[in-house]
Image: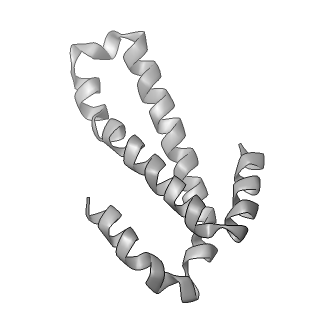
Amino acid sequence: MSNCHDTLTAIADLIPDDISHLIDALLEELLPTCYSIPDVLSASQMKSNDSMRKIHCSVRDLCATLQMSARMVPSVTGSAFNDKFAHTDKLVKR
């Protein structure tokens, strides 16, 4: 996983907008699943191996995406902050 992060960080230095949009798309895909975890855990579905596998994979993918997002900080701060603020603000408010 670390090698993937290093590779994406190097690519992000060249095309930060594309990688930033990719990370945003991944977050938008993963967050609804992660928000539904309490419902799945409290429901009778919790006993299902498929449900538990889905939760495990979603949390793992969310962690990896958040780690990559953290590594992108230098690409979206400083002079790039104003350009990225409106898009990021919209994502956070969702």
Q: Please state if 80 lies on the left or on the right of 84 as rendered.
A: right
Q: Is residue 9 above or below residue 78?
A: above
Q: Is residue 18 above or below residue 3?
A: below
Q: Which image quarter is the C terminus in? A: bottom left
Q: Position of residue 29 (x, y in %)?
A: 40, 42
Residue at the extreme top of the image, as rendered? 48
Residue 37 in which image quadrant: top left
Q: Nearer the viewer, residue 70 or 85?
A: 85
Q: Position of residue 18 (x, y in %)?
A: 58, 61
Q: Residue at x 50, y 29 (%)?
A: 57
Counting labels gives 0
Q: Residue at x 53, y 46 (%)?
A: 63
Q: Please state if 62 lies on the left or on the right of 4 as rendered.
A: left
Q: Please state if 71 lies on the left or on the right of 66 as rendered.
A: right
Residue 82 in which image quadrant: bottom left
Q: Nearer the viewer, residue 48 or 7?
A: 7
Q: Nearer the viewer, residue 42 or 64?
A: 64
Q: Residue at x 72, y 61 (%)?
A: 11
Q: Is residue 14 above or below residue 77?
A: above
